[in-house]
Amino acid sequence: MQIRNMKIKLLFNLIIILIISFLAPTGSEAKSLITDGKGIWINIWNYPSNPAIYCEQLKSKGIDTIYLQISRSNTPAIKEPAKLNKMIKAAHERNINVIGWTYSFLKDPISDARKFIQAVNYRTPDGDKLDGLAADIEEVTNARSIETFAKVIRKSVGPKYPLIAITFSPVLKRANPAHYAWKTVANNFDIIAPMTYWHGFVKLRSEKGAYDYTSQTISKLKEYTQKDDLKIHLIGDGQKTSKEEIIGFLKAASDHKVNAGVSLYPWYTPKKHQVEILGNFDFKKN
């Protein structure tokens, strides 16, 4: 009788372990979705002159992430360390994340990867750091270069560090799978952030136009990567875009249940209406 009870107990414990294993998140799901939320992008030439005021204004409008360019392939890994230190301090004092990004030419993917790793490991004089890092992949877009770049980084940062790829919108001709290695990007990066810029097309400068372009970006991204559960962060067009266009963009993100956040890339600095609409919009996610 005692042996039978022990067997039952062992079987019960085994079932519990199997249930926990089944319910536990997979490696990719366990990684932090650091792009979740709402953000504003800053390029390397447009750091705000007063980071504290800039961050205070964003925080007051419900913006919780800054995407800050820190380098290009032809610059040091951190081009402006003094300015970066001030931005990180001002943002973190207001509970705003700072995700760095670098424009990676990938003509020398190993060199670019080493700079990326340098930025991951960078610390301010106060011991603070970037909350994440993204690579803008627009120049060399073949599978071999992208995979080499990503694997060197992954070996250094480990399996849990979420890698972000900034890409073209797959709607564009130059982003056709014949020229852009979408499957390789999806297999080596945890979050894909397509540049959803519709304003260059005059016929799309409306709420419906922005909505349609954003919807097409999402559907083609899933088609080209062949991943329905892809983690997508949408970078919206802030290049003089109107209130109606931003609303269309955000509605598409909501309707298609974008699962890794939304943001705007402004023309120099974001317009008041752009920040307010982005900050106030409550989009539904998966």
Image (spheres, grey):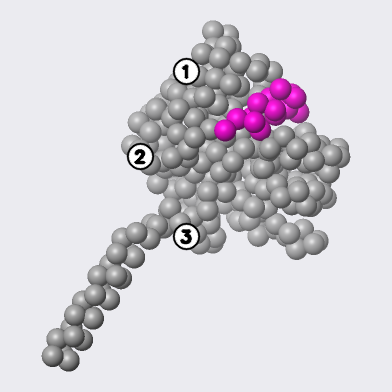
The C terminus: image quadrant? top left
Residue at (30%, 70%) from the top-left corner? Answer: 17
Q: Position of residue 49 (x, y in %)?
A: 86, 37
State which region is magenta: 269-282
Q: Give the mark nearer the N terminus: 2 vs 3.
A: 3
Q: CA distance from mark 2 to mark 3?
A: 20 Å
Q: Quadrant of residue 157?
A: bottom right
Determine whether the residue tagged by mark 3 lies in a helix, strand or loop: loop
Residue at 49% across, 30% down:
254
Amino acid type, residue under disc 2 in the picture: Lys
Q: Secondary structure at mark 2?
A: loop
Give the residue type that dot 1 points to: Asp
Report the residue marked by disc 3. Answer: 159
Main secondary structure along the magenta-highlighted residues: helix
Report which quarter residue 67 is drawn in.
Answer: top right
Q: Pointer 2: residues within 10 angstroms few (<14), some, or many (20+)?
A: few
For discs 1 and 3, the disc positioned in front in the rendered view = 1
Front one among 156 and 36: 36
Q: Secondary structure at mark 1?
A: helix
In this view, the residue farthest toward the front is 1
Residue 177 x/y as whole percent: 39, 30
Position above or below: 266 against 187: above
Specify whether residue 257 is painted magenta.
no
Please, which residue is most extreme toward the top here? 203
Kindly identify which residue carries mark 2: 227
Looking at the picture, tell me which residue is in the foreground, 95 or 89: 95
Q: Which residue is mark 1?
A: 212
In terms of sequence position, does the residue under pointer 2 or pointer 1 come before the other?
Answer: 1
Tell me which amino acid carries mark 3: Pro
Q: Position of residue 252 (x, y in %)?
A: 49, 25
